[in-house]
Image: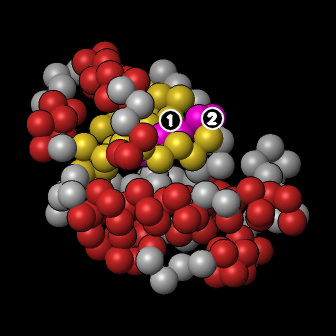
Amino acid sequence: MGTRAVLCALDATDSARILACADDDALIGVAAEIEERRDTDRLCELDSSWDAPHRCLTDGEPAFGNGDFPLSHSVLGGVPLHESGGYIVCHVTAEQVPAVADALEPLNGEWLRERYATLTFDACQGTADAEDIAYTQAFLPGLKQFHGAAAREGRAVIFTVGQ
């Protein structure tokens, strides 16, 4: 999977706008508008590293709905609203975000390194070498901070990625 991924924390208005989209074009348009605001306090850019953290926080597979809630909703989690044409949008409700933040809080780089080492990747998806693990570990603090802030502000979250 993927290229540049972004998590955006949504207020109630933007969350309702996302959920009310009548078709994929409208959904992509609203998601792009939200992302383009570049509200850095409510944005977590995962670059192309999103695949490995998702696998670490779920059952190890690059899929929707895998693993156990709440960690399964940290990256590629929640309700998939769109997956075609090279674009994915998933939505986590404001009610679910505090559980995600609480589940992420005790995790640290050592936990992520140990979990990462248990995963298997093919050649195009990465390796468990020190460089890949360090790159993945670098995103954990921001992921924790992002979900914690979204939870405190009562915000929903969308995950978007162009493939």
Which kind of residue does numbered mark 2 sit on? Answer: Thr
Q: Position of residue 104 (x, y in %)?
A: 45, 73
Residue underneath mark 1: 161
Give 28 or 79, whichever is nearer the viewer.
28
Viewer can see residue 32: yes
Q: Quadrant of residue 109?
A: bottom right
Q: Quadrant of residue 56?
A: bottom right
Q: Tell me what residue is drawn at x 25 percent, y 43 percent.
A: 10
Q: Quadrant of residue 39?
A: top left
Disc 1 crowd, CA 10 A, few/some/many (<14, 14-19, 20+):
many
Quote the CA–CA distance across marks 1 and 2: 7 Å
Asked which secondary structure carries label 2, the reply is loop
Q: Tell me what residue is drawn at x 41 percent, y 57 percent.
A: 146
From this view, report whether residue 39 is shown above or below residue 104: above
Magenta highlight range: 2-7
Instruction: Report whether 86 appears left or right of 114.
Output: left
Asked which secondary structure carries label 1, the reply is strand
Residue underneath mark 2: 3
Is 5 contained in the magenta span? yes
Q: Tell me what residue is drawn at x 74 percent, y 56 percent.
A: 135
Disc 2 crowd, CA 10 A, few/some/many (<14, 14-19, 20+):
some
Q: Position of residue 110 (x, y in %)?
A: 69, 81
Give 100 or 155, whichever is nearer the viewer.
155
Is 161 contained in the magenta span? no
Q: In which quadrant will I find the C terminus?
A: top right
Q: Tell me what residue is drawn at x 67 percent, y 60 percent.
A: 138
Earlier residue among tags 1 and 2? 2
From this view, report whether residue 40 is shown above or below residue 94: above
Instruction: Report whether 20 appears left or right of 145.
Output: left
